[in-house]
Amino acid sequence: MHKVIFDTDPGVDDSMALVFQTCHPQIELIGVTSVFGNATIETTTRNAVYLVERFADPGVVVARGAAKPLRKAAPEPIPHIHGENGLGDIELPDMPDEGRARLDARPAHRFIIDEIRKHPHEINLIAVGPLTNLALALQEDPEIQQLVKQVIIMGGAFGINGVLGNVRPCAEANISADPDAADQVFTAAWKVTAAGLDVTQKAIMNTAYLERIRQHGGEVGQFIWDVSRSYEQFHVDSSGVQGIYVHDSSAVAYLMAPELYQIRRGAVRVVVEGLAIGQTIQKPETMGVPAPDWDDVAKQDVCVDVDVEGFLQLYFETIVGRAG
């Protein structure tokens, strides 16, 4: 079993990644930590509770996280992408008392610290929003760098096959939302793997694929179809993509099937000031040119290619397997 803490800002694609985990028989979801990003912290926390209450095992809790980046104001929500309620404007019930009971009293970064210490060398920390909670956990307890099993993030864009950014020409949204936190996470001594736009924009679920999930995936499949309707229309309008990019579920897929991904190793730094703020720059370990800002920090893994058909099969079989 893979023990997972899921750090997220739900978000349509976040919700699809969360149900992916709840359906996989080899994932033990320890807890969900919310963070600002696709919506305000109030909305992302409420959505996390809704998703956990509806789809996760009874023991899974939600810990509310950071409401803003380390050094700047919180970004504006993006309802034109994720809807006014963050979940594609599907109808959401009022939070039941049972859902409120899912809220842990600890702030997200403290929950992360406590669970890593409770399960040393076992926790897979999957982060698919701004990395503020992870940075706060590092600041409060640096020793977790040696105690976590691995950190997998959906974030960054490294220029592979010309892929650059989605909120700036050089910056991806999650990293750009808190570049200071991202730089701290990438340069820490724990093991980080980044599934950035270089691979997530190759992994596309088209309309026919989503329709098959709806037909064969039971309640979860219907939810995936419903939550992705306006999200798919956004992709059609903004990029001409007949379907959706699969961002956050790619980080989960890497945990379950790393063989689907091609990796490039090397230190990663994040630009934290100026015109290129939020840009992720890796110095491949094969590059011999001295670069002190990279040479003195940990080397990390960046996904540079993906077996798209293998990924889509893994996701489909996981969702449909739960329904069966």
Image (cartoon, helix red, strand yellow):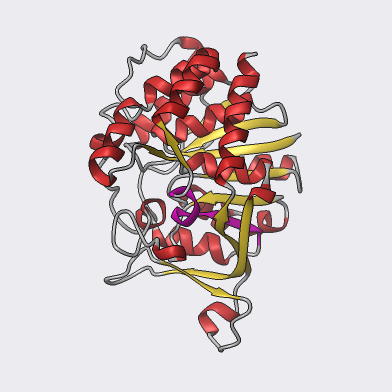
Is residue 104 toward the left or the right of residue 71 in the image?
Answer: right
Residue drawn at x 54%, y 16% as measured from the top left: 216
Q: In which quarter of the image is residue 265?
A: bottom right
Q: Locate residue 298 relative to residue 213 in the image: left or right.
A: right
| Quarter-of-image position of residue 12 | top left
Foreground residue, 179 or 243? 243
Q: State whether residue 122 is above or below residue 162.
A: above
Q: Which residue is drawn at 71% across and 45% down?
A: 117
Q: Where is residue 82 in the image (x, y as percent from the top left)?
A: 31, 33
The answer to which of 104 and 166 lies nearer the viewer is: 166
The quadrant of the rendering that contains the C terminus is: top right
Q: Give the range drawn in magenta.
A: 190-201
Q: Is 200 covered by the magenta stretch?
A: yes
Q: Residue at x 45, y 19 (%)?
A: 223
Query: From where the camera sits, is residue 111 visible?
Result: no
Is 167 one of the magenta-colored residues? no
Q: How many labels does the image show?
A: 0
Where's residue 76, x and y in %? 24, 44
Q: Is residue 284 left or right of residue 65?
A: right
The answer to whether residue 122 is visible is: yes
Please report the residue visible at 72 percent of the width from the left and 52 percent of the height from the top.
Answer: 147
Query: x, y percentage for residue 234?
Result: 27, 37
Asked if residue 292 is positioned above or below residue 275 in the image, the reply reads: below
Residue 248 percent across, percent down from the top left:
49, 41
Q: Quadrant of residue 10?
A: top left
As rendered, which of 277 and 206 lies closer to the eye?
Answer: 206
| Rendered-image quadrant of the N terminus | top right
